[in-house]
Every structure is written in structure tokens, then in C-alpha cells.
Image: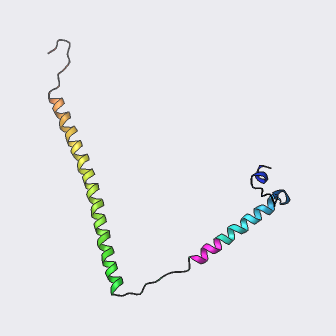
Amino acid sequence: MLVSTALAIPQIPLSNFSAFQLLVAGALLLGIATLLLALSRERRVSVKRSAATDELAVHMVRIAEALERIANQTTERAHLAASRHQVRTETERANEEAHSIAYSMFGR
């Protein structure tokens, strides 16, 4: 009942269609959409090799390598910062242990 009121168009009442008919219509629409997607994927563009495409390929390689270098620099900086923080905490712990005061009953 809610489906028919939510999807009702004033000129076409959904009460005239059964649930099975609506299911079949939805399945047919999905099948048609799948067929159209499959057919559209068959169109492919191929570029013939030329001096211009070779030059584009060289420039794309250079751009990719530059981006990889930038990404590696940021990860290396993060690793360095983490290792420096770890070294600092280890040295602070060592200093605290060296200067720690033993708690005893007599305060020695």
C-alpha cells in the first residue's frame, strides 16, 4: 500500500499492476541497462605510435617519478620524526632511571 502511494503518478495508478508485474518490469529495465553498459565498453580508442605520443609518454614518466619522489619524501619525513621521537623518549627514560630515587622505609 505504501509503495503504491509513494510511487503513484496521478495519471497512472499503481494499483492496476501486481507486484509480480512490477518486479518483471524492474528486471527488464536492469537487463536493458546492463546490455547498454556492455555495448558501450566495446568502443575503444587506440592511438598510433608517433613522435608526439612518444614525447607524451616520456613526460608522463617524468611526472610519475616526480610524484613518487614527493610521496617518498613525506613518508621518509614521517618516519624520521617518529624515530626521533622514539629516541628522545628512550633517552628520557634512561635519564629518569639513572636519577631515580629508591623509595625505602628509611629514606636512604
Front residue (pair 36, 12):
12
Which residue is located at x 31 percent, y 70 percent?
63
Q: Is residue 68 left or right of residue 34?
A: left
The secondary structure making up most of the magenta span is helix
Residue 93 lies within the magenta run: no
Which residue is located at x 28 percent, y 60 percent?
72
Quadrant hosting residue 73: bottom left
Quadrant hosting residue 67: bottom left
Which residue is located at x 51 percent, y 81 percent?
44
Residue 9 lies, with reference to residue 55, above or below; the image says above
Q: Position of residue 100 (x, y in %)?
A: 17, 25
Q: Quadrant of the C terminus?
A: top left
Q: Is residue 35 left or right of residue 83?
A: right
The image's colouring method is: rainbow
Q: Is residue 52 left or right of residue 106?
A: right
Front residue (pair 12, 1):
12
Q: Which residues are magenta?
A: 34-40
Extreme-right residue of the structure: 16
Q: Position of residue 50 (x, y in %)?
A: 36, 88
Extreme-front residue of the structure: 10
Q: How many marks?
A: 0
Q: Position of residue 66 (x, y in %)?
A: 28, 67
Front residue (pair 24, 91):
24
Q: Position of residue 33 (x, y in %)?
A: 65, 70
Residue 77 lies, with reference to residue 98, above or below; the image says below
Which residue is located at x 61 percent, y 78 percent?
39
